[in-house]
Amino acid sequence: MSHTPHELHEEFPEHADKITALKTQDTHFARLAEEYHEVNRAVHRAESNVAPVEGLTEVDLRKKRAALKDELYRMLSE
């Protein structure tokens, strides 16, 4: 299996312990983290042409990933 960039622990290494804790303690955070993971995988599959999509679809996926990442970072920074 190839390496998938933009995983949460790689994006926020300084918050790795908090990410792990929040995934088990906060259902909203866990849901957002899972959604981020799914969207991130979809972006990676599209970028690597494993599952190609139209250009606008890929842009929308990237925007959704960024929005989720921003929300997750906000929660990690609290």
Image: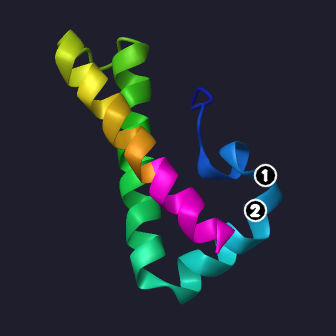
Give the magenta range: 69-78
The quarter of the displayed image where residue 6 is located? top right
**Residue 60 located within the stretch drawn in magenta:** no
Few, some or many residues within 10 Å of mark 1 (<14, 14–19, 20+):
few
Residue at 72 percent across and 73 percent down: it is 18
Q: Main secondary structure of the magenta part?
A: helix
The residue lying furthest to the bottom in this view is: 25
Residue at 57 percent across and 32 percent down: it is 4
Few, some or many residues within 10 Å of mark 2 (<14, 14–19, 20+):
some
> Amino acid under label 1?
Pro
Residue at 47 percent across and 61 percent down: it is 33
The quarter of the displayed image where residue 42 is located? top left
State the quadrant of the C terminus: bottom right
Query: Marks 1 and 2, Cα distance to the nearest angstrom?
Result: 5 Å
Q: Which residue is mark 2?
A: 16
Position above or below: 68 against 49: below
Instruction: State the scheme by which the image is colored.
Output: rainbow
Image location of residue 60, percent across then percent down: 25, 29
Image location of residue 70, percent across then percent down: 50, 51
Position above or below: 45 against 66: above
Q: Secondary structure at mark 2?
A: helix
> Amino acid under label 2?
Ala
Q: Which residue is mark 1?
A: 13
Residue at 52 percent across and 60 percent down: it is 72
Image location of residue 47, percent across then percent down: 41, 15
Q: In the depicted view, which residue is nearer to us: 48 or 70? A: 70
Q: Are marks 1 and 2 in contact (CB under 8 Å)?
A: yes
